[in-house]
Amino acid sequence: MIDVQPIAVYIDALTSEIRIAHVQDGRLIKVDYLRPSDNRRRGDIVLGRVKGAVPGLSGAFIDIGDPVEAFLPLPEKGRGAALPEGAPVSVRVHRPAMGGKGARLKLVSPDEEFQGEPPCLLAGADPIAAVATAVMDTDGELTVQGMAVWRKINAQVHETLGRTPESIGHFSDRVDLFDHMGLSAQIDDALSPRYFLPSGGCLRIHETPACISVDVDSGTATAKAGRKEMIRRTNVEAAYAIARQLRLRNLSGKIVVDFIANNNRKDGAALLKILEAETANDFSAVDVRGWSRLGFVELTRVRQGASLLEQLCIPIPVGNGTGLVKSPVTLAYESLRQALSTYNSTSGGSVTVRCPLSVAAMLHDDLASDVSEVTETAGRPLKIRGDTSMPLDRVDVYAEA
């Protein structure tokens, strides 16, 4: 019987951006980012308004207050088959907006009861409470940095269980929890298109609107035991790594894997078994469809929210194409956490954030309340200096006497 290690969950709640990391056997397997700017959550019941029917798609576009109109599939007959433009309609968010696409909705059944004021009549499950409950149900451990959220979780769990388990810890060290646990570096690695394997090979992961492609490259892998054995070993390492990277990066939809060519059918079947076993406990359903006639392995993974890259990065022009860098809001939150660490590691004087203009604007406007809270907690000034010469993906945070 395989000994499955319990999952440890780490929650960073020092700013209004809450990060939730799931770690198993010392390795990051999933990370979620919760921001105040996020739109509707899965499960929210919302009072929307019909903007227009789309007969060819058997549905209608609905205004639910998001920047992009949501889509509501409609039955051909019965309730909701014909919704006039401008009509109010109660809907449930089935899939939140992501990647520039509007939310996907479902009609609320007439017998559902809910309370609240428009536009959100009933909020979906609190993701933090859901994580805490899941951890308690699986005998895992939960560590929280941020006193307010730690107290909230303790109150919720105590109300459910009648007691506060010792497995809910508060991280009070004067360093960033994710940095301390080595999670920040693992998150940055997951934003790279390359993932290096122990043998020296690597995965090249490309996200496109049509599909996710994964190329397995032998890289610097050596062939001491012969080329065939090198190929077999690299492909096996890749199969285990692919299952982990799909979950960590939250890659979904159609996935095509190009393993290193190997005509051994037994080895090919073994790779499929590894993928099936390693994705069996994924948070999203994964279907390993097998080898295609072109020699690729095809999988599908049910979409649950945006990929990690979509959450944290934005495209920018690079030469004749595009590249990806961390978004201004991602960098703004990172600079605030760096400022807190700098305050804690120095005494007296102000702390300066030198950053691109877009990040400075984010700190001055959208995150102004976070900046105020950080400076009030530290009792020291925070200077924000927008610099046109700064690369778009960089911020410098330092103390001044």
Image (cartoon, grey):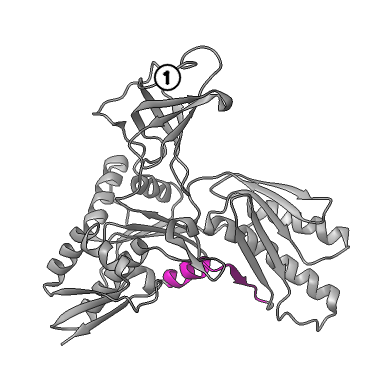
Q: Secondary structure at mark 1?
A: loop
Residue identifier under label 1 = 109
Q: Residues within 10 Å of mark 1 (few under 14, many from 20)?
A: few
Q: Is 254 a magenta residue?
A: no
Residue 68 in picture, x, y percent from top left: 40, 41
Task: Name the amino acid, label 1.
Answer: Ser
Q: Quadrant of residue 124?
A: top left
x 46%, y 47%: residue:
100
Q: State the quadrant of the C terminus.
A: bottom left
The residue range painted magenta reads 182-198
Q: Position of residue 88 (x, y in %)?
A: 34, 22
| Quadrant holding the N terminus | bottom right
- From this view, report whether residue 229 is shown above or below residue 263: below
Horizontal side of 389 relative to 302 (left or right) equals left
Q: Is residue 190 magenta?
A: yes
Counting every numbered tag in the picture gives 1
Q: Is residue 44 above or below residue 194?
A: above
Residue in the foreground of this view, choosing between 104 and 202? 104
- Point out residue 69 in the picture as x, y percentages from the top left corner: 41, 36
Is residue 218 shown above or below 6? below
Pick the residue in front: 351 or 345: 351
Farthest-out residue, front: 320
Q: Quadrant of residue 346?
A: bottom left
The residue lying at 65 percent from left, 76 percent from top is 198
Q: Residue furthest bottom?
A: 401
Front residue (pair 345, 68): 68
Horizontal and vertical percent for residue 197?
65, 73
Q: Is residue 337 left or right of residue 306?
A: left
Res. 3 visible in picture = no
